[in-house]
Amino acid sequence: MTITKQLFGTFLAAAALLSAAPSVKITLDKTDQLYKCGETATFTIAFTDDANEPLAKQATYKLTNDNVTVFKTGNIDTTQSPTTTFTGTMDKPGFLNLTIYCSYTDKDGKKQNLKNNICTAGFEPTKIQPAAPKPADFMDYWKGELKKAEKECPLDPQMTKLDKFSNAEHTCYKVSFAAPGGRVYGFLTIPAKAKDGKMPAIVSVPGAGPGHGAPSQDNSFVTLYMNVHPYDPYIEGKTVKESYAELNKPGIYMFHGGKNREATFFHRPIIGIARAIEWLANRPEVNAARIGYYGSSQGGAFGFIQAGLTGRFAAVVCNVPAMCDHFGVNAGRRAGWPQYRNTFLIKNADGTTAFDKETDGWIGYYDAVNFASHIQSPIRVIVGFIDMTCSPSSVYAAFNGIPSTDKAIVNELDMGHSTRKSYSDAQAWMKGILTK
């Protein structure tokens, strides 16, 4: 099931509240921005100038497959009146993206780029397939890694009560668990009324960045917030941002470990968080049949990963999920964050670059589309049509392969890498399932 959020009215109302600075408005001839392959999509572009902050007389446009394969480029005279139109189509499922590049001179004499300069048409996106096949031993590999960890790396759960966040209604703890290559850290909150019987629980993993520095409280649920990083997120006198800066001194964290399948950064948190979820499910306060998950971006990816790997969730919410369709460029489209193939390029003798065969050998094991293909839980996914970080094609490549009989995706037509009310609505849906 696909749900389209028609946000043009909201967008225009918000735009009216802004200053009279130059702007561009791009619309499509279908309000749901969905087309059949071979059908023509018509984009309408309207520039708004301002005498005090003059718009450049010429803009550049680019029509692409999900901002990768370029179909057409050219210039637009911004003085044309009243509008300019372009048409385009795709003969295969995907996203036709129109981007307008134009600047203006603000009141301080500085050059500024126009915002809201992207619009995307989806061509039968529910038929998009992953750009590469799943490794034949994919789930055998991960189940084997979990078994190996159980044998070689005792869980060693550690809980420290955090008086600062605890009160008569709930008790908060800092928790950590052993995993291959180091520990994983997070926070556990147990409501006082959990003593009266087994409660539903919620698990969450944050988006990319320093991670959670404090627990979350919802006295209707036991909550487990797990970070992906190998550092303690709550140290008196030290912030998570300071720990994060230290972690990234050798380079941004998601690329640590290089091209080694077991040493790459996400191996430890995938295994460690899966074990933490199992530990949670076996706690006396928790109803193991009523555990939910929500997360956005990196956290959305971990929703796919842990739902597929553990099978522990009664309901899952993934907003603009990352780590999807790492081989997207094979199909001429944009892969989701962190775009491993474009990072681990090799340089040829003639100065050109090429994709690295060694990288291609392991990234499929960290592709969220492959975990998603094992999800049986009820799930809600939210995708931003103009998301340049976690492209809509990468999200649909994962969503389409989910075998759950209760799944739906919300199309946020003018949203980039962000959150909207649809995310909180989906969390409310999840909580409703957990408390039935």
Image (tube, grey):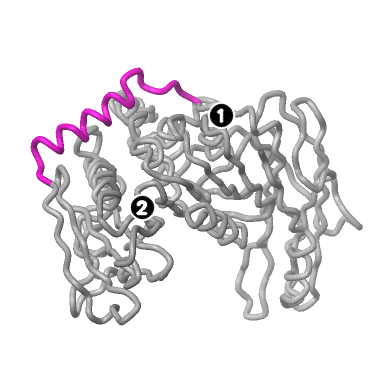
Does 81 appear above or below 15? above
- The residue type indicated by label 1 comes to Gly
Residue ID at (25%, 34%) = 259
Residue 137 percent location from the top left of the image:
31, 20
- Which span is picked out in magenta? 131-154
Secondary structure that dominates the magenta span: helix
Query: Residue 424's quadrant in the figure?
Result: bottom right
Q: Which residue is mark 1?
A: 332
Does 383 appear above or below 207? above
Q: Is residue 132 magenta?
A: yes
Q: Nearer the viewer, residue 15 or 232?
A: 232
Q: Tell me the number on the disc at residue 258.
A: none
Residue farthest right in this picture:
82
> Earlier along the polypeptide chain: callout 1 or callout 2?
2
Q: Nearer the viewer, residue 379 or 191?
A: 191
Residue ID at (67%, 62%) = 114
Q: Which residue is mark 2?
A: 287
Secondary structure found at label 1: loop
Q: Quadrant of the N terminus?
A: top right
Residue 73 percent location from the top left of the image:
70, 39
Q: Nearer the viewer, residue 302 or 363?
A: 302
